[in-house]
Image: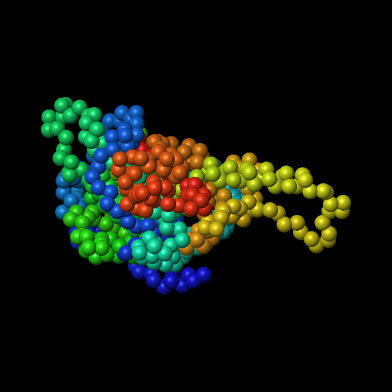
Amino acid sequence: MDHSSGAGGHRPSNASGSYDSAKNGSSASPGTSDRRPTDESTPGESGYSKRRRMQERHQNRKRGRTPPSVFSRRDRSRSPQNATPHHDSRRSRSPLPPRSPPPADDAPKQRKRPGGGARMGLVDRETIRRRQEERDRQQEEDAVRMSRDRGVSDVVRQHYNAVPERGREWRKTESKIKGLRSFNNWVKSTLIQKFSPDEDFNARFNDTKDWAEDSAGPPPMDDKKLLVLDLGCGKGGDLGKWQLAPQKVDLYVGLDPADISIEQARDRYHTMRSGRGQRGRRPPPTLFHGEFQPKDCFGESLGDVRIIQQVGFDANAGPGGSLMAARFGGGGFDVVTSMFAIHYAFESEEKTRQMLSNVAGCLKKGGRFIGVCPNSDMITSRVSAFHEQRKSREAAKAPEPEGPEDGEVEEEERCEWGNDIYRVRFPGATPENGVFRPPFGWKYTYFMREAVEEVPEYVVPWEAFRALTEDYNLELQYRKPFLEIWEEEKNDRELGPLSERMGVRDRATGALLMSEEEKDAVSFYHAFCFYKV
Ligand SMILES: C[S@@+](CC[C@H](N)C(=O)[O-])C[C@H]1O[C@@H](n2cnc3c(N)ncnc32)[C@H](O)[C@@H]1O
């Protein structure tokens, strides 16, 4: 595997300075979809209707109005191009200072009586020595864990950096998995169409809100645009989908640790902006402002990313955060999205929590966290079926009279499944009942033809994940396996025709344009939407 391009193409990381420099756009590149093969374009999703879709969006939700975000405290009618956020003295960078860490076990304790400390010192020399040993051991463990984690992250980053950008035409015509690519893209578009608009936008569309109390009536539709953050944006494959979001996007921030992918995303953005590569189409008159930066979004806080500070970040989001911060604070983004990426966070509880505190810290109240990832129900049923079959095979086998011969090691069977286009392989033991406890660190490798070379990823045990999200004030609104989304939305007035334009369904026959193998591969995934409450 050639990973040299991963190291060779480094550019200094750059938040692109700021919105100001962003005026004329930022960085972008002709994109490609990354690994879960998708395709950049979402042809011609136009306009915005969809009563049923809208109703589902905010089902049974009666929330108060979303308090203005830090960004929106400024004049939201101004485009970011006109904003000068980092000179805005009205806004602190985050609502509250970060919580101070809990006192370390070995922090100096206050002496109760003069001389008491000295006596303790004499008496507890052995205890001190033991503590020191314990600290040394802990440090060593941390160092081993960190280098192991970094090892996996590097493999993932290098893999994505090395995925070639083959171009849209190739993906649409030559690819052996073009049906799957189109389908994945359609699911992502569907999620964006259904859940990116905010409550006011939906209320206006459905005409369900009583605006009579507001003397000024609803703000003009164009004034309220979305601020979107994409965690694991890859090569920018979703930029076109965001351009077609029902509620217009003001700012799109794309982060990903794969620096080469980020350069390609930036190029793609500039190509869109300039109108090049639009096949005769003119450049979009109102393309949002885009910012792209290499960043590990699960191993590190996003609080040091300048554009995120400018929009607003709550460093206290999560367990133990103050009620005041939860009620009035919060981040400034309307939508945080993470497509085909959160499974990398499930390497450890620490990373999963870091991912969630980044999501919650960036979202304003009422904001949406949308994404797609492998469906653990699917994994659980495959794993438990594997163990059932293994046990019946073993029971059927006649017992060997004299066990294995000297030096002979019985190879343990490992759980794996897949077909010609994808494969999931667990390198280690798996739980017999398919229930992953504790819920972190269940590594498997994933292979996808033309797209992913046996990259390590981690099970996202759904119920454990959902339980954890509650600590971060994220409330589940929607979760659906990919093929169910198709069944539910294929006849939708907008998403149905969109599927034909995207090459997901045959216009003449109405057939889904995927082989059985592709269908099997996409059934591995589900989509979700959480609300920040
Ligand atoms: C399958 S690709 C998906 C790219 C894009 N979201 C899409 O749907 O086309 C997975 C992406 O997750 C990114 N990723 C892996 N670890 C990450 C991390 N710690 N933080 C953010 N992104 C990460 C990879 O670099 C890769 O670009």
Quadrant for residue 84, please give it: bottom left
Residue plotted at (87% across, 51% down): 401
The image position of residue 17, as x and y in percent, is 26, 61
Q: Is residue 421 above or below residue 375?
A: below
The image position of residue 49, as x and y in percent, is 25, 39
The image position of residue 517, as x and y in percent, is 52, 53
Q: Is residue 316 above or below residue 8?
A: above
Residue plotted at (30% across, 43% down): 494
Residue plotted at (39% across, 71% down): 9
- Residue 143 seen in the current view: no
Residue plotted at (16% across, 35% down): 218
The image position of residue 41, as x and y in percent, is 32, 56
> Is residue 141 toward the left or the right of residue 239 in the image?
right
The image quadrant where one finds the C terminus is: top left
In this rendered view, identify the residue nearer to me: 450 or 364: 450
In this rendered view, identify the residue nearer to me: 524 or 501: 501
In this rendered view, identify the residue nearer to me: 49 or 313: 49
> Is residue 499 toward the left or the right of residue 132 in the image?
left
- Residue 89 seen in the current view: yes
